[in-house]
Amino acid sequence: MSSAIPIVPNSIVPNSVLPLIRAKALSKTYQMGEVEVKALSNVDLEIYENEFVVILGPSGSGKSTLLNMVGGMDQATSGELYYKDTPLHTADPRRLTLYRRDAVGFVFQFYNLIPNLNAWENVSLAAEIAKQPFDISTTLAQVGLAERADHFPSQLSGGEQQRVALARAIAKNPELLLCDEPTGALDSQTSIQVLKILKDFHQKYHKTVVIITHNAGVAAIANRVFYIKDGGLSRIVTNDHPISPEKVNW
């Protein structure tokens, strides 16, 4: 399928740049009783260091499946997937755990905070297992929650909870930040706040950020956009001039 993907001119990253993530003929099939469901089919892609990428597609298109495999939470049925030179498609559970711990930060649509821990404690859980974490208090301040560090999730708005989740992911100082519909449960103004935090992390620390979303407007802030349809990669588009989050059309 990848050979038929239309590429916008100038969308090819120079060959001298080493891919951070590389997928080749990546496929995933789930067995639902007697029925086989193809969630992903023959996806070829490369994601580079210091890229801001959006994976765009409707619900059920396979984008979450792709993100889960890139994040080491699931493995392919067939095909190859690499983080730098490390093969993820053949990695054992221990190697995948170390990969998730050391290289990846996760942000989910519904926050996944621990309810009986305050904001500082939720962030500290991730920082404690990281090799070179950022300072927790500084990270909370960067997401605008310095004054809410001792508040529990039930005392925070949805937008504040998502910013705690962002701080938790960022505090690990990950090479790769994966975001699954991070604005899906938020209003437009709060979504702008969240996207600004992600952009700032990408630009300040030169990290790779990948967002999956069904919101076409968000694609305009990315360096490149991967369009997923019916389990396949239908096209790749480069934004030569990504817009700021404030200009996203909601």
Image (cartoon, rainbow, N blue to C red):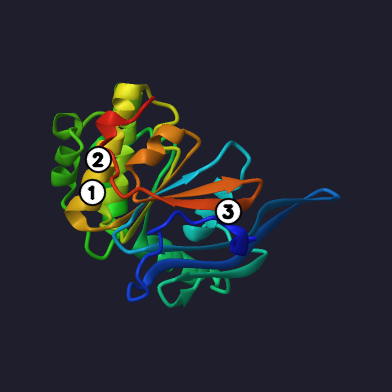
Residue 16 percent location from the top left of the image = 33, 76
Q: Which residue is mark 2?
A: 197
- Measured in 3D between alpha carbons, the distance from the residue under mark 2 to the one under mark 1, in whole angstroms, is 6 Å
At horizontal 60% and vertical 47% (from top left) the residue drawn is 62
First of labels 3, 2 by sequence position: 2
- Relative to 54, residue 144 above or below: above
Using the image as rendered, state which of residue 117 and residue 25 is in the foreground.
Answer: 25
Closer to the camera in the image, 167 or 204? 204
Q: Residue furthest right?
A: 34
Please, what secondary structure does the residue beneath circle 1 have?
A: helix
> Which tag is nearer the camera, tag 3 or tag 1?
3
Mark 1 and mark 2 in contact (Cβ < 8 Å)?
Answer: yes
Which picture quadrant has residue 61? Answer: top right
* Mark drawn on residue 201: 1
Query: Residue 212's spot in the image, x, y percent?
Result: 46, 44
Residue 134 found in image quarter:
bottom left
* Residue designated by label 3: 233
Q: Residues within 10 Å of mark 3 (few under 14, many from 20)?
A: many
